[in-house]
Image (cartoon, rainbow, N blue to C red):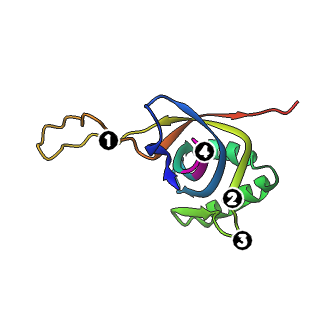
Amino acid sequence: MRLLSDSIADDADFFVEQIHVVAIVFDNTDDVTVWATTLFDNDTHFFHLALPFKALDTLLSLAHTRADALQEEVADALAAQEWPALLEYNSDEKPPVPLPSVALKLSVTYPAVEDDETGDGEEPDDPQPHNIFYLEGVYVRLDT
């Protein structure tokens, strides 16, 4: 499995489909990270998806038959207040969660600029993107 960040051509927003959620990580903030896979350029790629907690509910509601169970599991983890909460879906008992008919619009992220060894604080000539993407939009294919 490859990293999605290794296969993108530029820093423009782009879409992914055929998404499978393999983990959800959150704490007592509004930030959530979803670990997911997607079929991109005919190969499976892994990526992290950063999104606000409210958008997580939207994604989970698109998991069709597993939506209610997933939302209940997130609610139970919130009630336990053990941070960070890690919900994994990568086993026979809890397989990855498909998001059928869903396309996600993602934006690329880059590491924060830090002072390099020379101390000049300049950005590298060819910065490599993080394998963490921000969610820009959720699109659902409607069957007619």
Q: Helix, strand or loop at disc 2?
A: helix
Q: Quadrant of the C terminus?
A: top right
Place residue 25 in its image quadrant: bottom right
SS assignment for the magenta stretch, majority: strand
Residue 75: image tag: 2
User: Which sits earlier in the primary sequence, circle 4 or circle 3?
Assistant: 4
Place residue 78 in its image quadrant: bottom right
Q: Amino acid at mark 2?
A: Ala
User: Which sits earlier in the primary sequence, circle 2 or circle 3?
Assistant: 2
Do tag 4 and tag 2 residues touch (Cβ < 8 Å)?
no
Query: Which of the two discs, 3 and 1, sits closer to the camera?
Result: 3
Report the residue at 47% width, 37% height from top: 8
Report the residue at 43% width, 31% height from top: 10
Residue 93: image tag: 3
Residue marked by disc 1: 112
Residue 42: image tag: 4
User: Which sits earlier in the primary sequence, circle 4 or circle 1?
Assistant: 4
User: Which sits earlier in the primary sequence, circle 2 or circle 1?
Assistant: 2
User: Which sits earlier in the primary sequence, circle 3 or circle 1?
Assistant: 3
Q: Amino acid at mark 1?
A: Ala
Query: Which of the two discs, 2 and 1, sits closer to the camera?
Result: 1
Q: CA distance from mark 3 to mark 1?
A: 38 Å
